[in-house]
Amino acid sequence: MCVVIAAGAAMAQKKLTWGPKVGVDLTHYWGKDALGHKPQLNYQVGAYLEFRFTDKLAFAPELVFAAQGGKWSDCDIDDDGNKFYYDATDHVNYINLPLLLKYYVHPSFSIDFGPQLGYNVYSKTTYDYKDKSIGKYTMDYKEDTRELDFALALGCTYNIASDVFVQARYTLGLSRVFNDLKDKNGNAQIAIGYRF
């Protein structure tokens, strides 16, 4: 709250910019129960504000919809011992609120870091069985997924022009994704944005 109040007070004195951003994410799980899980390609779309305090320092909150999750493979075994192999894809989507502090090491380049809070809006898993007689189906896991996700973000922003920038960032989840597993989110991102 102190940072937001300070940002608001500085807004009248320093430059305020805002705009949309969109990106490609490589999402995955990490932690004790994430062994054998694979990353998957996802996306993000949202908007940001940047309050420039000084030439070197800025505060940049964002509001982003991010498709996250991971992939894994396993099998079901019936009463006769027959194995049915499948590939599974988790779709765990969030509305994320990164609260980033930006330090400009160069007028066109900043190091960005800070906490992120995510709210889970969609949790489903798609199972694709090798046995075509079973095929593919999707199950809802919203009740088994935690609503809030806490993470730390670290990355950088490069201003290609006065109104266009690119970002690279990694977000490390600190809280469990599921109620009964210790999987946590990880997200490597590349995004492009426009500055008004």
Image: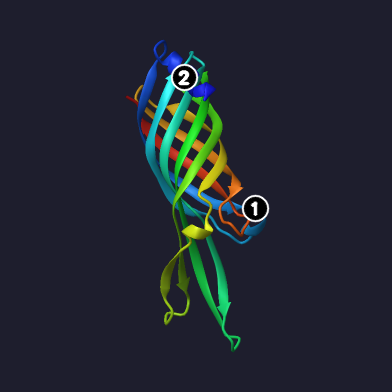
The residues tagged by marks 2 and 1 sit, at their Cα atoms, a distance apart of: 35 Å
Residue 111 in percent (x, y) is at 54, 27
Q: Residue at x 32, y 24 (%)?
A: 196
Which amino acid lies under the numbered mark 1 shown in the image of this protein?
A: Gly
User: Is 192 situated above or below 159?
Assistant: below
Which amino acid lies under the numbered mark 2 shown in the image of this protein?
A: Ala
Helix or strand or loop: what does disc 1 sit on? Answer: loop
In front: 80, or 42? 80
Specify the farthest residue to the right: 32
User: Is 162 situated above or below 75?
Assistant: above
User: Is 131 situated above or below 120?
Assistant: below
**Any mark on residue 9, and which?**
none
Residue 37 in percent (x, y) is at 58, 59
What number of labels is visible? 2
In the rendered image, which residue does mark 2 sit on? Answer: 7
Residue 152 in percent (x, y) is at 58, 37
Sequence-wise, the earlier of marks 2 and 1 is: 2
Q: Residue at x 53, y 29 (%)?
A: 112
How would you rate the neighbour count of disc 1 (Cα within 10 Å): few for under 14, some for 14-19, many for 20 or more?
some
